[in-house]
Image (tube, helix red, strand yellow):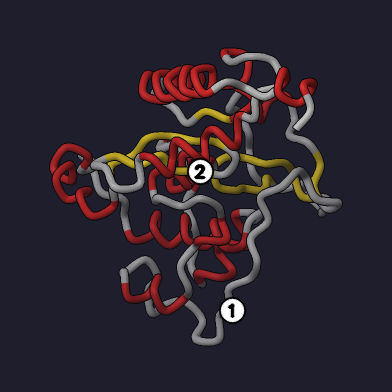
Amino acid sequence: MSDDFESTAPSPDAAERNLRILEALLFASAEPLSAGELAPHLGEGVDVEGLLALLAERYAGRGVHLVRRADKWAFRTAEDLSFLLRRETTDNKPLSRAALETLSIIAYHQPATRSEVEEVRGVATGKGTLDLLMEAGWVRMRGRRRTPGRPVTYGTTEAFLDHFGLESLADLPGLEELKGAGLLSGRLPPNMQIPLPFDGPLRDDEDPLDPDDIEGQDEEQ
């Protein structure tokens, strides 16, 4: 092994210090953090993703786990111990059946407009239902569909992934699991198929949101 390689390789002490820094930052943060957000706190050229994977491995058997949510990381209670905190995290007001169905459909069909959600559910979806899901931080406005009326398109958020313990949309449960959990009712079409959800940048059939939309004053067609 050359002297040049040895001089650039991080020392064990430096690696351990960086692991401790990552650990402290993630514990102190109320929200999941990405490797890019963590990198400025570490030395130049540090393999942040590699250190995060190592830290997750170290916590694998503990009461809290380091988990990935989309492209961000956070400490969360171990799955088998989550019942201990269930009393503390119970929502004051459970979501209605309409809200749960709307959330499920948006998650699987995103980007989806209100009329597209209504088409799948077979009943009208009140604007208040979408407002409730956006207030919870689980649904966001993505853009506007390039169709007459330019209706708003909706998608899920990183907070949605975090709340439901998903690393990515690929981890969403199947249709039968959703029905078994009571998230979908018998009103849905029996031949309903679950598509591949899209959570990337705006698609070709979407325009950016209008300034009024960003200020929360949208009027969906």
Q: Residues within 10 Å of mark 2 (few under 14, many from 20)?
A: many
- Dividing the image into 4 quarters, which one contains the N terminus? top right
Residue denoted by label 2? 69
- 219 or 14, which is in the foreground? 14
- 165 or 68, which is in the foreground? 68
Residue denoted by label 1? 193
Q: Quadrant of residue 75?
A: top left
Q: Secondary structure at mark 1?
A: loop
Note whether 108 is above or below 45 in the view shown. Answer: below
Q: Residues within 10 Å of mark 1 (few under 14, many from 20)?
A: few
Residue at 22 percent across and 48 percent down: it is 82
Residue 96 rendering spot, x and y as whole percentages: 31, 55
Residue at 17 percent across and 42 percent down: it is 85
Note whether 164 is above or below 63 in the view shown. Answer: below
Counting residues from the start of the chain, the first of labels 2 and 1 encountered is 2
Residue at 49 percent across and 62 percent down: it is 172
Q: Nearer the viewer, mark 2 or mark 1?
A: 2
Q: What's the CA distance linking mark 2 and mark 1?
A: 26 Å
- 71 or 186, which is in the foreground? 71
